[in-house]
Amino acid sequence: MKWQEYFVFDKKLLFSEPTIKGTRVSVDEIIKLLAKGWNEEEILENYPKLTKKSLQAVFYYLLCKTMYVLSKPEKQVN
């Protein structure tokens, strides 16, 4: 999956937060909903512009971002 096809990174839209194309829904918003206990079905019902593929893109984006952060060597504090 090319998660990049599902997102917009626009300074004029939610301060450059990764936002799902065609919406004003950010990756952070989806994560907050999941943290509150929402499931995929509830998210799709309440945000009809989202699709299962766009939610999969959110998860893939987070996976890639996490792997990138974890692959960076830790900075040593002197």
Image (spheres, rainbow, N blue to C red):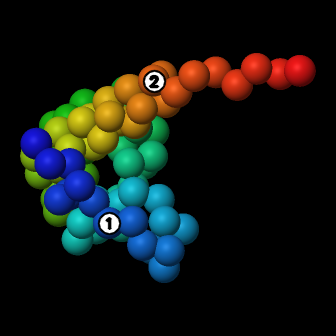
User: What kind of element bears circle 2?
Assistant: helix
Q: Which residue is mark 2?
A: 71
- Is residue 36 rendered to the left or right of residue 62? right
Point 27% across, 35% down: residue: 59
Point 23% across, 71% down: residue: 22
Q: Marks 1 and 2: which is nearer the front?
A: 2
Is residue 78 visible in the rendered image? The answer is yes
CB-based contact (under 8 Å), mark 1 and mark 2 = no
Q: Give how far across and how far down residue 31 sits, in percent.
A: 40, 38
Please tell me the numbered disc located at residue 58. none
Q: Which residue is mark 1?
A: 8
Q: Give how far across and how far down residue 15 sits, in percent.
A: 54, 68
User: What kind of element bears circle 1?
Assistant: strand
Is residue 66 visible in the rendered image? The answer is no
Q: Nearer the viewer, residue 29 or 69?
A: 69
Q: Give how far across and how far down residue 11 sits, in percent.
A: 50, 74
Residue type, numbered disc 1: Val
Point 24% across, 36% down: residue: 60
- Reply above or below: 17 against 14: above
- Reply above or below: 4 against 10: above
